[in-house]
Image (tube, rainbow, N blue to C red):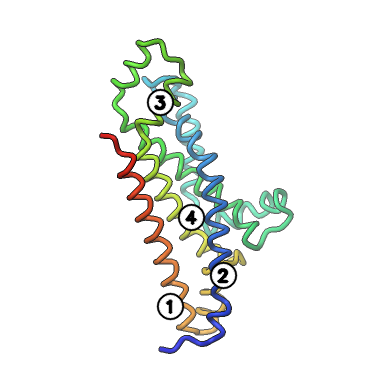
Amino acid sequence: MTIRADVWLMLPPALWETLYMVGVSSFFTTLLGVPLGIALTVTRPGHILGNAVGNRVLGLVINAVRSLPFAIFIVAIIPFTRLLVGKSIGPTAVIVPLTLAAMVLMARQTESALLEVPYGVIEAAQSAGGSTGQLIWHVLLPEALPGLVQAVTITVITLTGYSAMAGAVGGGGLGDLGIRYGYQRYRLDVMLITSFLLIVLVQIIQSSGDWLARRLNRR
């Protein structure tokens, strides 16, 4: 199969839009999701700041957001997206639902990574007089760093998939190119090349995350 010349002209801007959406939303997702995951962890009963009611409420909110399919979620928060960025379509607008949808996934992934830290390590730091902030920043997070890297890796890959789905509602990027010029116009060459680029992008993200996690693993 021959890929037509017009595809090569459309690919660079579409790839850039995907990288832009995934990159910016990954930054904000990590910035918001990791603290949320820390809150989920330390408020568990028996943990540093055990609070059963607060932990339960926070968990219910996160689970509620996670239960919504992204295609529905992106449409449901259009008024909020328009309020923040002044528009509801395009790569910049899509960053809002991408961040909010992936933030709760990042929180759960962060919680899982932090719970792998033996509580005996935390108790030893507590007995030495460490404050709550010191326990989190100097014990919990450093010990869980390889797991946190894997959590970020999984979340970025999820965002890559979400960005492709966002193309169905005018989000731009490779997903938009594949849907509008590939699927809707029966262009097999467009669908194949966009799918291939998304696969390569995911492989790069996964390999990079695995490498960094191995380098940080002190166990």
**Amino acid at dot 2:** Ala
**Image location of residue 202, percent across then percent down:** 40, 61
* Among numbered discs 3 and 1, the one appearing first in the sequence: 3
Q: CA distance from mark 4 to mark 1?
A: 20 Å
Mark in the foreground, 3 or 4: 4
**Amino acid at dot 4:** Leu
Q: Which residue is mark 4?
A: 159
* Among numbered discs 3 and 4, the one appearing first in the sequence: 3
* Among numbered discs 3 and 2, the one appearing first in the sequence: 2
Q: Residue 10, relative to residue 66: is it above or below?
A: below
Q: Residues within 10 Å of mark 4 (few under 14, many from 20)?
A: many
Q: Which residue is mark 1?
A: 192
**Amino acid at dot 3:** Arg
Q: CA distance from mark 3 to mark 4?
A: 28 Å
Mark 3 residue element: loop
Q: Residues within 10 Å of mark 3 (few under 14, many from 20)?
A: some
The quadrant the C terminus occupies is top left
Q: Which residue is mark 3?
A: 44
Asked if labels 4 and 3 touch by Cβ distance under 8 angstroms, the answer is no
For residue 138, the mark is none
* Among numbered discs 2 and 4, the one appearing first in the sequence: 2
For residue 14, the mark is 2
Q: CA distance from mark 2 to mark 4?
A: 16 Å
